[in-house]
């Protein structure tokens, strides 16, 4: 079984020293570099390049520079998607965003996790668990979403939150760790 197959099954895999995965990351990081260095006025070229980077998109999307991801092809975004400056998506596993998702600056979505056992961790092993975000979700600035989290529809995640567990639909949630504070 390849390291990529292990990754896609949610098993521990060698992310750091596997040449095939390394080449995939280098390819998308080169594309992100190009994207991040295009003038904001070149809107059509930027839109075309971000669609090349991401796995699946609808028509109406805007991702501000700087943007970084690991593979790109594991990311899907719905219609009317906006990500502000300094967005990071570590997409070892699928990261799915619904329609009408707005993401503040300096937000990160991290599917990657590492073993607690330092011997395994020092070998470069990690795992990846998917992240799923529903429709009509707004993330304040500096939010971090951790591996395996699902966020329901019609949710507001307050600035500075660290989302470690699933968030149900129709709520406002914030904090570290993020927790529901009000139903909408």
Image (spheres, rainbow, N blue to C red):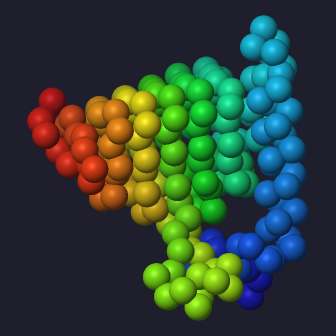
Picture layout, residue 23 above or below residue 51:
below
- Res 97 visible: yes
Residue at 49% over, 88% down = 117
Residue 168: give x, y in percent of width and height.
23, 48
Picture layout, residue 102 above or below residue 17:
above
Report the front residue among 41 and 170.
Answer: 41
Report the front residue among 105 and 167.
Answer: 105
- Res 4 visible: no
Report the front residue among 22 and 95.
Answer: 22
Picture layout, residue 53 above or below residue 44:
below
Residue 63: give x, y in percent of width and height.
63, 27
Picture layout, residue 31 above or below residue 2:
above
Residue 170: give x, y in percent of width and height.
21, 36
Total numbered circles: 0
Residue at 13% over, 40% down = 181
Whether residue 45 sits left or right of residue 74 in the image: it is right
Whether residue 149 sits left or right of residue 112 in the image: it is left
Residue at 51% over, 45% down = 108
Residue 145: give x, y in percent of width and height.
42, 50
Q: Quadrant of the rendered structure where residue 31 is?
A: top right
Q: Quadrant of the rendered structure where residue 159 is?
A: top left
Q: What residue occupies the far bottom of the structure in this picture?
A: 119
Q: Quadrant of the rendered structure where residue 15 is?
A: bottom right
Whether residue 128 sits left or right of residue 68 in the image: it is left
Residue at 78% over, 22% down = 46
């Amino acid at each position: 079984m390849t390291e990529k197959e292990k990754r896609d099954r949610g098993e521990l895999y060698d992310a750091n020293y596997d040449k095939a995965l390394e080449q995939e990351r280098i390819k998308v990081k080169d594309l992100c570099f190009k994207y991040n260095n295009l003038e904001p006025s070149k809107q059509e070229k930027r839109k075309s390049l971000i669609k090349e980077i991401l796995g699946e998109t609808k028509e109406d999307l805007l991702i501000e520079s700087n943007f970084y991801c690991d593979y790109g092809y594991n990311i899907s975004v719905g219609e009317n998607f906006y990500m502000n400056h300094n967005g990071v998506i570590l997409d070892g596993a699928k990261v799915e965003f619904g329609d009408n998702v707005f993401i503040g600056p300096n937000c990160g979505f991290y599917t990657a996790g590492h073993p607690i056992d330092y011997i395994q961790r020092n070998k470069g092993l990690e795992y990846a668990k998917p992240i799923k975000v529903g429709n009509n979700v707004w993330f304040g600035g500096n939010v971090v979403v951790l591996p395996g989290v699902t966020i329901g529809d019609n949710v507001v995640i307050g600035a500075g939150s660290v989302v470690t567990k699933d968030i149900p639909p129709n709520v406002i949630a914030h904090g570290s760790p993020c927790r529901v504070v009000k139903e909408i």
